[in-house]
Image: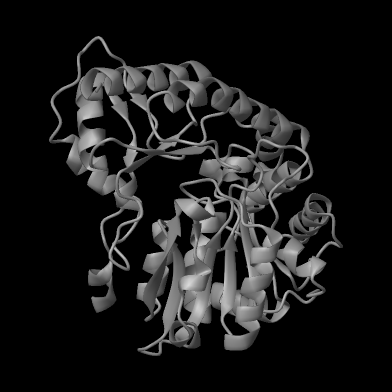
Amino acid sequence: MNPKLRLLQPYPFEKLRALLATAPAPATELTHVNLSIGEPKHATPALVNEAITSHLSGLSAYPPTKGDALLRESIAAWIGRRYNMPAPDPQTQVLPCLGSREALFAFAQTVLDGASDSLVICPNPFYQIYEGAALLGGAQPYYVNAVPERNFSPDWSAVPAHVWEKTQLLFVCSPGNPAGNVMPEQEWAVLFELSDRYGFVIASDECYSEIYFDDAQPPVGVLQAAYKLGRTDFKNCVCFSSLSKRSNVPGMRSGFVAGDASLLESFLLYRTYHGSAMSPVFSAASTAAWNDEAHVEQNRALYKAKFAAVYPILAEVLDVKMPDASFYLWAGTPVADPDFVRDLFGAQHVTVLPGSYLAREAHGVNPGANRIRLALVAPLDQCVEGAQRIARFVRERYAS
């Protein structure tokens, strides 16, 4: 067996299941409200379903590793529209993938050279794929803590020069998971300068980019920031995006990688052997989704309504602020976060995720400690019910 597999830690939801097994049984009259996992629950757009059923004949053909040409063109055109910039070259700067998770992991295996002292920098808290991709690629993760003083953004200035010198890959997540923070353009400029100086690749995870609250200020993406700074070749930069959250199709596993053509050329070679190619059926459905914005606007409206209803309830009892984007709330707890989550489940049959499960202790602290992540993906009434039960729990258990 690959000895690197022993380096992998249990996934947050495995830890959560073990934690809840120690909780008292919830009252039988309380239906379960699950706010722990970021799995979209809104209806899949009809145009996606129609595209699938009308292209089932595509199951009789092997899909091209590079992806369907029409899909690549649709993705490139969407990038141009969304970020108000020239569309990237669909031939050399765009690759469809089986969701951003698969691509984030596989891309690291392409970039990392296996040197024993190589580093991968990632935010802390973080999406655990970043850590696993680094470890199985033969590198060590270096965690940059996200702090409240920076809107829960990683403090890149805290990274010493000797760390940057050994860094081969930097994972960025904007909008962030779990805090929903968006990285401003000036911070992208800082990272580009560091990348030029030290030679590392920037992998920007942007899967939450289409869930935001201010229509006048959609989140900035890495390619957009690069273009505005004259980096039109997107040197050492790639973005990862997905239809899962944007279009409510997590089961379709459809996304893309776009950016530096030289990096994508190597990534395509890797994928030729890796065997990850999108079915023609889902390629047609993905093309329909990327070409339509009406369903995305409707999706945002549903999330806006949930945040407008839930946030005031929780703000009265917990340390919480509205995110810039995404469908998460990142709330402080009055006691250790695993204790809070366990006792909340037993008392109110509501499941949330301990923040410390999304982070590692680094530089003397676990930046997820004493926080919880709530995913507002359930229907509005369930989200409101869950928030009301959390508020009741806090008032009854921790009233001063």
Identify which residue is drawn at 18% across, 43% down.
Answer: 18
Q: Nearer the viewer, residue 159 or 134?
A: 159
In this rendering, the answer to whether 173 lies above or below 65 is above
Q: Is residue 80 left or right of residue 352?
A: right
Q: Nearer the viewer, residue 308 or 33?
A: 308
Q: Quadrant of the N terminus?
A: bottom left
Identify which residue is drawn at 48% across, 50% down.
Answer: 177
**Residue 234 appears in view:** yes
Identify which residue is drawn at 38% across, 31% down.
Answer: 318
Q: Is residue 379 left or right of residue 268?
A: left
**Residue 62 appears in view:** no
Quarter where residue 255 is shown:
bottom right
The image shows residue 247 at horizontal and vertical percentages of 64, 39
In this rendering, the answer to whether 248 lies above or below 357 is above
Q: Quadrant of the C terminus?
A: top left
Q: Nearer the viewer, residue 177 or 58?
A: 177
In this rendering, the answer to whether 285 lies above or below 361 is above
Toward the top, the furthest residue is 29
Quarter where residue 317 is shown:
top left
Identify which residue is drawn at 69% across, 70% down.
Answer: 189
Q: Is residue 74 left or right of residue 25?
A: right
The image shows residue 192 at horizontal and vertical percentages of 66, 75
The image shows residue 137 at horizontal and vertical percentages of 40, 78
The image shows residue 387 at horizontal and vertical percentages of 41, 22
Q: Is residue 284 left or right of residue 326?
A: right
Toward the front, the furthest residue is 400
